[in-house]
């Protein structure tokens, strides 16, 4: 009654059962409208918060990771001294191979001294410190070259060498003269040399293809590490997943959806498939270790085993999405096919399956993308660690030779002591994200393009 | 679901037999995360200089590595276990039970354990007694064993700043933890006289007293880190008062973020550890399964290459990374080339 007493004087005294008009809102309507406005505001706030998080994530990843795609290189002329590399002078490849990478150190020191002299750089550094601005990978690069081209011994050849991780960090601004105060790995005098070489145009920062194609490197040479080989490891695992999970998953769902009788057994299977989809991935890793490695004696660290474990993980996802897309095909299609005399199998394979295919493919791609980003199960089957194998040459090699996977490689880099690896971990995340976004976009396109609504 | 798994296994067998599973031709290594960087440096150089494939090195901690090492003999078990502590009798027994009897122990050098805080925070000069008083579960106050009452570093030692005690120590699966307990906490326990009190309380039982000494407080002032040093570093970066336990090599790669504390007045460095002045150091090992030598190609060559002068010597890449070279390296080389097993029975 309070609102009645507050209504303007002179208004007709009418009882208002439901209150207000379109023009004049009652407190209750106002309250309801306000709560709706509040709810909208919450929604917008939630979306904004999500977007801000995404923005922060993307800027952090891009900001920290782009450095990995650039690398500092030094161009040097190296005299491949015969007395160091081929003492007997007979160019016997076995004798040349006996010179280990440690035997190449004097040649590298001499090349640095020659460069300092050529560009007239004044420095008080000893030859060993001069060579210290180069990567430890240089000796391996030289040795590979000499073994591949023994006829070049005695000649002077121009090489493009990696600079050490600290020098690279200095060129990228990650390392400064203040931050190396207590650092034993590099001295201010070496940074002076780097500045002088950069001014002479010998030392420069360029795009680093080796990061995308190369293999992992040890803690002593972060500058040489690349994600390429582990990318191949991921690829082979995905091949295994695709080859196993798609046929098994589709066959299982077709049977369950189209042929299986409805009884307690199929109900139990259904419930368990849904449960399996929610099992933490590490459990599949333990299962993989017990079954594939300890019982079946498959090799450890092999992408084949990784693929098998991820297949188990991906199967429920594929089965659930396949069943959903089979269900969405209207029964009239089946009835019509059966009505004109098709067998049940013909009805399924000629009519239902083609119509459900876009949904199945979408589910498969999303399942694969999920498997691609998975690290936990790989921990237990030996795919996380220092695995610096060469790129596999054959299919069998790719499946059975030890390899890592992209997320495992990123995890491994993030653990290492040298900050240069940290940058590469972020760079690896960028590459992994590009793959995931591409796969998800493909799934969306497939769905948009081919899905039929009934 | 069971039939799906069965199908998966059947297909897997088919896939493997189709590709004719070849014998393993690369060395498999696992174990201590402290040894991992050294092992990976050696593995990389080994792959470059020999015609054998690059060995695979996994981490996971000394105990986890030795456990896998002792699982048995055969291609699907690892060949080498890295450890930042000596193998225990219990582990040797577990190995023997699974048929792993001839084990070659190889000491590669020494590693220092350092105490470091954020480079912008307070600097410390510790003694083992300070750490015992800061982290032990029970300490001696006026001759009585009481629950540790110290909450700030100033409570521990009047020379220290009055900041909250917050220490990040390696978890129990790390070999580093044991050295920390032995060389720091236990030493501090004896120094402060608490050891005698514990011994008295347990009726003269030395073992029980040692166990009581190394029991760390559980009120959150001491945090076990089960991950790697990068996790400890991240904790210190987010908590500027925190002090972490690191390996010397890790600290030397992160001197811009960390400042190191002295222990008993000595600054940790490869030199002060080599001379024995810096008290908290430990030997690093790897263990080789003798039964795998000759079966896994390159295993013996890898072990020999690891301890070669040009690799593990004072001028080698391992020393450059932070390993303190072993003065008795020549004996180790001799032991590896003659495949001398532990217990000296061959």
Image (cartoon, coloured by chain):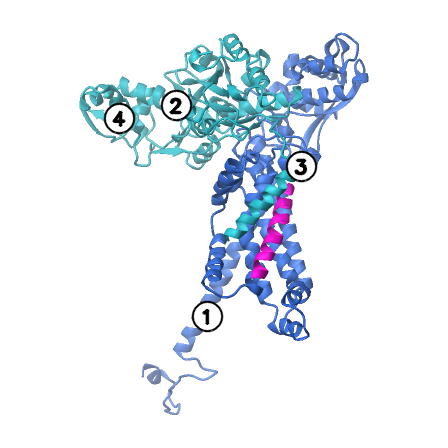
Q: Main secondary structure of the magenta part?
A: helix
Q: In what element is the residue under mark 1? A: helix
At 39% across and 77% down in the image, what residue appears? A27
Extent of the magenta region: A231-255
Q: Is residue A319 left or right of residue A21?
A: right
Q: In what element is the residue under mark 2? A: helix
Q: CA distance from mark 1 to mark 2?
A: 71 Å
* Residue on which the image places disc 1: A36
Q: How many marks?
A: 4
Say few, some or many: other residues with alpha carbon within 10 Å of mark 1 (under 14 / 14 to 19 / 20 or more).
few
Q: CA distance from mark 4 to mark 3?
A: 56 Å
Magenta stretch containing residue A241, yes or no? yes
Magenta stretch containing residue A3, yes or no? no
- Residue A396 is tagged as 3
- Residue A422 image position (x, y, % from top left): 56, 34
Mark 4–mark 2 CB contact (< 8 Å): no
The chain coloured blue in the image: A
* Chain at numbered mark 3: A
At 80% across and 17% down in the image, what residue appears? A152
Mark 1–mark 4 CB contact (< 8 Å): no
Figure colour of chain B: cyan
At 61% across and 34% down in the image, what residue appears? A403
From the viewer's perspective, is residue A130 above or below residue A350? above
Q: Say whether mark 1 and mark 3 are on the same chain.
A: yes
* Chain at numbered mark 4: B
Q: Say whether mark 2 and mark 1 are on the same chain.
A: no
* Residue on which the image places disc 2: B93
Q: In what element is the residue under mark 3? A: helix
Say few, some or many: other residues with alpha carbon within 10 Å of mark 2 (under 14 / 14 to 19 / 20 or more).
some
- Closer to the chain start, of discs 4 and 2, is 2
- Residue B268 image position (x, y, % from top left): 44, 18
């Amino acid at each position: 009654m309070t609102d009645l007493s507050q209504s303007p004087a002179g208004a007709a005294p009418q009882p208002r059962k439901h209150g207000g008009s379109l023009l004049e809102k009652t407190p209750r309507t106002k309250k309801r409208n306000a709560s709706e406005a509040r709810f909208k505001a919450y929604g917008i706030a939630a979306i904004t918060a999500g977007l801000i998080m995404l923005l922060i994530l993307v800027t952090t990843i891009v900001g920290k990771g782009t450095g990995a795609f650039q690398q500092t290189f030094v161009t040097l002329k190296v005299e491949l001294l015969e007395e160091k590399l081929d003492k007997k002078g007979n160019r016997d490849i076995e004798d040349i191979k006996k010179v280990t990478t440690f035997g190449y150190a004097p040649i590298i020191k001499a090349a640095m001294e020659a460069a300092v002299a050529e560009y007239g750089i004044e420095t008080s550094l000893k030859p060993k410190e001069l060579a210290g601005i180069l990567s430890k990978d240089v000796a391996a690069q030289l040795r590979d070259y000499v073994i591949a081209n023994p006829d070049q011994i005695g000649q002077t050849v121009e090489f493009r060498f990696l600079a050490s991780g600290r020098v690279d960090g200095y060129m990228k601004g990650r390392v400064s003269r203040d931050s190396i105060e207590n650092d034993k790995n590099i001295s201010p005098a070496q940074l002076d040399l780097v500045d002088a070489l950069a001014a002479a145009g010998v030392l420069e920062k360029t795009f680093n293809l080796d990061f995308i194609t190369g293999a992992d490197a040890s803690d002593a040479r972060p500058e040489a590490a690349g994600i390429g080989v582990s990318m191949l490891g991921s690829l082979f695992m995905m091949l295994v997943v695709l080859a196993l999970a798609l046929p098994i998953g589709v066959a299982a769902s077709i049977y369950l959806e189209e042929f299986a009788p409805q009884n307690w057994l199929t109900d139990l299977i259904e419930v368990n498939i849904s449960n399996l989809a929610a099992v933490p991935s590490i459990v599949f890793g333990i299962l993989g270790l017990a079954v594939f490695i300890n019982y079946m004696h498959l090799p450890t660290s092999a992408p084949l085993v990784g693929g098998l474990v991820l297949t188990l993980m991906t199967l429920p996802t594929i089965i659930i999405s396949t069943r959903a897309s089979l269900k969405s095909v209207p029964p009239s299609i089946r009835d019509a096919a059966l009505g004109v005399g098709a067998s049940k199998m013909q009805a399924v394979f000629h009519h239902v399956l083609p119509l459900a295919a876009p949904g199945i493919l979408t589910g498969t791609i999303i399942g694969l993308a999920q498997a691609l980003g998975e690290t936990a199960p790989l921990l237990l089957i030996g795919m996380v660690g220092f695995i610096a194998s060469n790129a596999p040459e054959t299919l069998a090699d790719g499946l059975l030779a030890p390899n890592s996977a992209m997320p495992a490689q990123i995890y491994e880099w993030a653990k290492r002591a040298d900050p240069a690896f940290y940058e590469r971990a972020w760079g690896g995340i960028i590459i992994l994200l590009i793959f995931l976004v591409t796969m998800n976009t493909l799934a969306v396109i497939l769905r948009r393009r081919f899905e039929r609504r009934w | 679901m069971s039939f799906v798994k069965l199908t998966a296994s059947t297909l897997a067998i088919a896939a493997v037999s189709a590709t004719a599973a070849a014998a393993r031709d690369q060395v498999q290594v696992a174990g201590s995360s402290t040894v991992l960087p050294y092992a990976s440096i050696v593995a990389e150089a080994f792959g470059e200089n020999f015609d054998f494939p690059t060995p695979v090195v996994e981490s996971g901690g000394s105990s986890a590595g030795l456990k896998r090492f002792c699982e048995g003999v055969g291609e699907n078990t690892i060949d080498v276990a890295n450890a930042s502590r000596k193998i225990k009798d219990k582990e040797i027994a577990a190995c023997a039970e699974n048929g792993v009897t001839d084990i070659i122990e190889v000491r590669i050098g020494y590693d220092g354990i350092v105490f470091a805080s954020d480079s912008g925070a307070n600097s410390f000069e510790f003694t083992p007694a300070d750490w015992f008083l800061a982290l032990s579960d029970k300490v001696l106050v006026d001759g009585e064993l009481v629950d540790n009452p110290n909450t700030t570093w100033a409570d521990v030692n009047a020379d220290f700043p009055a900041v909250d005690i917050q220490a990040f120590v390696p978890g129990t699966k790390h070999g580093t933890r044991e050295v920390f307990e032995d060389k720091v906490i236990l030493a501090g326990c004896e120094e402060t006289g608490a050891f005698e009190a514990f011994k008295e309380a347990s009726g003269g039982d030395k073992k029980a007293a040692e166990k009581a000494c190394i029991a760390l407080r559980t009120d959150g002032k001491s945090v076990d880190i089960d991950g790697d040093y990068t996790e400890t570093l991240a904790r210190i970066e987010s908590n500027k008062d925190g002090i972490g336990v690191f390996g010397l090599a890790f600290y030397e790669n992160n001197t811009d973020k960390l400042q190191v504390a002295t222990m008993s007045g000595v600054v940790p460095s490869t030199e002060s550890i080599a001379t024995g002045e810096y008290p908290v150091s430990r030997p690093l090992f790897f263990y080789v399964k003798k039964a795998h030598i000759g079966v896994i190609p390159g295993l013996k060559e890898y072990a020999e290459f690891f301890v070669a002068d040009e690799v593990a010597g004072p001028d080698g890449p391992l020393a450059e990374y932070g390993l303190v070279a072993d003065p008795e390296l020549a004996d180790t080389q001799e032991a590896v080339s003659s495949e001398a097993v532990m217990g000296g029975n061959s």
